[in-house]
Amino acid sequence: MTPIEPLILGVTVDLGGRAHGLAENWRERWTRLITALDGVAEFAVLEDGFARPDGDGPDATLLANWLAPLAPRIGLIAGAALNLAEPFHVSTAIATLDHVSEGRAGLLAQRFRNARNAAAFAAIGRLNGFPDAGSEKALDRDLADAIDVVRRLWDSWEDDAVIRDTRTQRYLDGGKLHYVDFAGETFKVLGPSITPRPPQGQPVVAARWAPGEDDTTVVQADLAILQVAHIAAFKERPGTEQTLIVAELGESDTLFAALRQAAGAGARAVSLTLSGVPEEAEAFAAHTAPALRAAGLVRPAVEGPLRRRFGLTATPSRYASAA
């Protein structure tokens, strides 16, 4: 059998549904879940369930900020519906997560489709500054603009903007904060951010992809999350060469064979879908993950900044040289 490069192991948890509502024991349940996964999975994708008919669960970015101090090793990639959430607020929430987690933050740029999209826009009503909910092209363009703005805001503070100068009583050097001055078709953002630059500079950005969908978002992203069967089609798309592939596996997948197929097709990481029940996470940590590592299918969990775990280079502020 042809040797494969061991994959980076992660998990995906969909926060939507009544099982993730604010039950009385939600703190205990999430503490058990994230504690079981910490040091076992290298990252967790927390998919936001915004406006799901059966209950949308907790806000993914807020939950990730609460979980980060409880789990000092696992990376947290928090979802946000960027067609519906303000990019400025998403940017500051993920920047805060990166500070709280000491460099383990990521953003899942979510884009709803079809009935899910209609339900989400019905929940917020008709407001100025939002794309046409019935236009796929407008929604794709708006999502691309939102990712661009989020990234620009992370760069709007230079790395050494905070000086804490007691002699002059200045907390920061105002010359190292920069306007982003973005104007898209549906919104404008002047900036700068209200949150210092994240420890990673640019937290990891992930996006989902399937055949027939617009490529703009995944070209902007660091990680493309997709099904194993779609990897070959994704690699044929122009501009995707630098995007790392994360193969997402569901309950119906034959695990060992699917991981071998994903690695052979060019995936760099794998994310196994969990329901969010603590007992399932504990069984994954006690049995599934050790078996996958013993088989050489996934690598031992490493620590440190999330970008470094994926082999992504450091990113200096785009505005620093223009200062």
Image (spheres, rainbow, N blue to C red):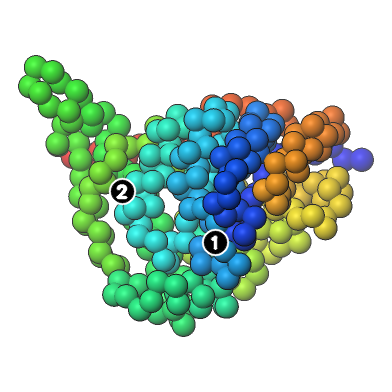
CA separation, marks 2 and 1? 28 Å
Q: Residues within 10 Å of mark 2 (few under 14, many from 20)?
A: many
* Residue furthest out toward the left: 168
The front one of 207 and 28 is 28
Residue 168 located left or right of residue 271: left
List the residue tagged with mark 2.
153
Residue 304: where, in percent of width, then height?
54, 27
Task: Identify the residue at image location x=42%, y=66%.
Answer: 83
Secondary element at tag 2: helix
The quadrant in which the N terminus is found is: top right
- Report x, y in % for residue 162: 23, 29
Describe the element under mark 1 as helix, strand or loop: loop
Tell me which amino acid carries mark 1: Asp
User: Which sits in the foreground, 321 or 223?
Assistant: 223
114 in relation to 308, above or below: below
**Of callouts 2 and 1, the N-terminal one:** 1
Q: Which residue is mark 1?
A: 56
The three-letter amino acid code for the residue at tag 2 is: Leu
Residue 242: image location, x then y, percent: 55, 49
Left or right of 308: which side holds 267? right
Question: Is 175 left, or right, of 61 in this rendering?
Answer: left
Residue 45, position as x, y percentages in the image: 59, 47
